Image: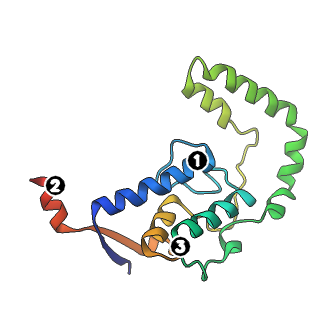
Amino acid sequence: MKTIINISFKNLRQNYREVYQLLCKESGEKKINTKSKIANDLFLFGDDNYYLLHDFVIQNNLDFTNFDYDKHFESECEFNITIWSIISLILIPLFIVKYILSFLINFLSKDFGNKIHRFNFFLKNYQSDRIDLTMGDLITCKICGKFQLRENFQFVLLKSEIKNQQS
């Protein structure tokens, strides 16, 4: 059963914008939505996501005492000492060519340049058994004032505000 949170559209939109801007700034990505995963979609691994969460919690004065980092993210060391890292070292020349091509083609077509930039040399993406946090989870945490997963909540806009917007 989901917990219902009654919220004004203005408040929800403000929280969305603040989290969106933070994630854009930290990840460099512009195509972010509430289902975007911090590690797998925004490529914030290890120390990057740790400091992102640390700053987010401090900025918003959130209670994250029941947050277990290891349940949601891999530490810098866990992620770097994988077979994928060793294979990546072998493929460094291909990665350099890929980035040069994406940079040059980006001037002609941003979409095609981004496709080249996102191209993965591996047949299978790295998949973790961790529960990656999403932008929606961060918005929920910000609204609730403590660590909460988005999947446990339903946001309902206040009726008085809906009537005012329709007028």
Disc with the residue nearer the chain's start (3 vs 1):
1
Q: Residue at x 57, y 57 (%)?
A: 37
Against 64, residue 118 (above or below) is above
150 relative position to 111: left or right:
left
5 relative position to 45: left or right:
left
The crowd level at tag 2 (other Cα within 10 Å; few <14, some 14-19, many 20+) is few
Front of the two marks 3 and 2: 3
Position of residue 94 measured from the top left corner of the image (x, y, whole percent): 82, 31
The answer to the question of whether label 3 and label 1 lie on touching residues, with beta carbons closer than 8 A, is: no
Q: Residue at x 35, y 71 (%)?
A: 154
* Colour option used: rainbow
Q: Amino acid at mark 1?
A: Lys
Against 78, residue 83 (above or below) is above
Per the image, the residue denoted by label 1 is 25
The crowd level at tag 1 (other Cα within 10 Å; few <14, some 14-19, many 20+) is few
Tell me the distance, in whole angstroms, between the alpha carbons under discs 2 and 1: 31 Å
On residue 165, the disc is 2
The crowd level at tag 3 (other Cα within 10 Å; few <14, some 14-19, many 20+) is few
Callout 2: SS: helix
Tell me the distance, in whole angstroms, between the alpha carbons under discs 3 and 2: 31 Å
Q: Amino acid at mark 2?
A: Gln
Q: Residue at x 71, y 73 (%)?
A: 70
Callout 1: SS: helix
Q: Is residue 34 visible?
A: no
Per the image, the residue denoted by label 3 is 61
